[in-house]
Structures are given as C-alpha cells and as structure tokens.
Image: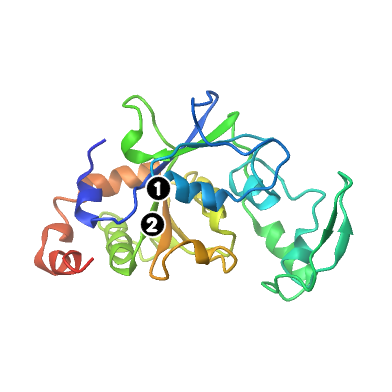
Amino acid sequence: MSSALLDALNLSHRPLAIRLTDERPHDALQFKAGRWGCVAAMLLAATQGKTAVFDRGTFGCPGGGTGLGFGRAYEGFPIECLLSTGGRFDLPDGQVRDFGAGERFLASPEVARRWVASLPIREVPTDYVVVEPLDQLAPDATPALVWLLVDPDQLSALVYLAGFRRGAAETVTAPWGAACQTILFALAEADRPEPRGVIGFFDISQRHRIDRDLLSLTLPWALYRDLEADVDASFLRTEPWLRLRARS
C-alpha cells in the first residue's frame, strides 16, 4: 500500500501491520507449541519482510502471550519474581525455573504484582494475531495496529502530527512493559475515542536487538489513518521538517 506518511518520514525499517484474524497465513513464521520464544524477535523479522503468526498455544513466553492480547498468560508463572528479586520455582507444567538474582527491573515481587494488576489485559476475539510488513497488506485487509521503528526525529514528527487536528497535549503514551507489550497497550488505546500512539521498546533485556537511536511507536489503525490524511496540510511539507528528514 502506498503511504504519503511513510514517504515523508523516510523510515529505515519497514512498518508492520498487526492484524487480528481467524485465518492462519501460509508460510508464516510461528513458534512451536509449548516452546519458548521472543515476540520482539519476531517483530524484527517482520521488518525484514517475513510474516509471523501467533495463537494461544504459540506465543513464545507469558509476557508475549499477555502482550499479544491472549488474556492472562502470566497465570501460573512467577513473573513477579523474574522481574524483581529472582528465586527458583517449580512450575505447574513440571518445569523448574531458576531466575537467579532476578532481572531487578522492579524493586520487589509486590511491586511487580502491582504492575501486572495495572495491565490493560485483553482477550483478542480471534484465533490468530498476525504481524506482517505493511506494504504486503492485502487491499481488503484492515489491521488493528501499525508498528513502526523510529529515530528521535521521526518520533518527534509523529508526536506533533498526532496533535495536528486534536490540539491535545498528550498524543502519545510511554508505558512500562516488555518490548512486545506495546501491542497490548495499543489495543487498549484503540478502544478510546481519541487513541494515542504507544512509544516502546524500552525493555532493557531486549534493546540489544535494535540500534541505540531507535524506539518503537505503535499506532491504532484509526490514529494511523488520521495521520495519513493530515500529511499534506501539515509541517511535513515545510522546510523545517525537510531539513530534519535530509539527515536521517
């Protein structure tokens, strides 16, 4: 699909469409059932032209299942200890997990439990979540979200453009979560009358996968369409932005 917005931004990575569907695409990357895997790595593979698909048995890890909107995938998994002070645990499936001293992202298991309780848990109404390059999206397909990797100039442009027709100060949000969980937060934003973009990929355990000057921005489809419609009337056609675009 052609896009004045994406042309104006001059992105270095292919934007992604995130679709909710009951049809599994052919030749898509998919984790094996019950096997551990990283959804963030799949997102990055999709920026290289791959299509990835997830279902309730193949979401890779509890954080990924939660982040993709497959309900409370943390149930039975001691995420509060992994994120904080660690420990060794027998899981319900018979596996043993030793988290050592923990990731120390949160101060204590109790703090981590408060974070889990704050998540906008979603149960997507479809069998599959599909991630694919936006330029490969079928003409009759409508994604739920658009996922972008952006540098500081491009992020600045998108934040400004999101306020172009709204006159709102808070056009984006930057929640605490795993790299893939911007999907969950953006699905929650899509339910708002004026959805915000979700900045992400702050995840310290996953940032090694991308260049240091990149973050993700996940846009609900309605917001993406507004931004697309506003390109020609906006600053994206003026000299200050063109000067910034030339250095990207």
Residue at 70% in and 58% down: 116
Relative horizontal placement of residue 6, taking residue 190 as reference (left or right):
left
Report whether 43 appears left or right of 60.
left
Q: Is residue 218 above or below residue 20?
A: below
| 1 or 2: tag closer to the N-terminus | 1
Q: Quadrant of residue 240?
A: bottom left
| Residue at (52% x, 45% y) in the render | 187
Cα separation, mark 1 vs mark 2, equals 9 Å
Q: Amino acid at mark 1?
A: Thr
Q: Is residue 114 visible?
A: yes
Q: Is residue 229 left or right of residue 204?
A: left
Image quadrant holding the N terminus, namely: top left
Q: Relative to residue 105, is residue 179 depicted above or below?
A: above
Q: Secondary structure at mark 2?
A: strand
Q: Which residue is mark 2?
A: 149
The front one of 50 and 86 is 50
The residue depicted at 30 percent of the width and 66 percent of the height is 156
Q: Which mark is residue 98?
A: none
Residue 196 in sight from this viewpoint: no
Mark 2: amino acid: Leu
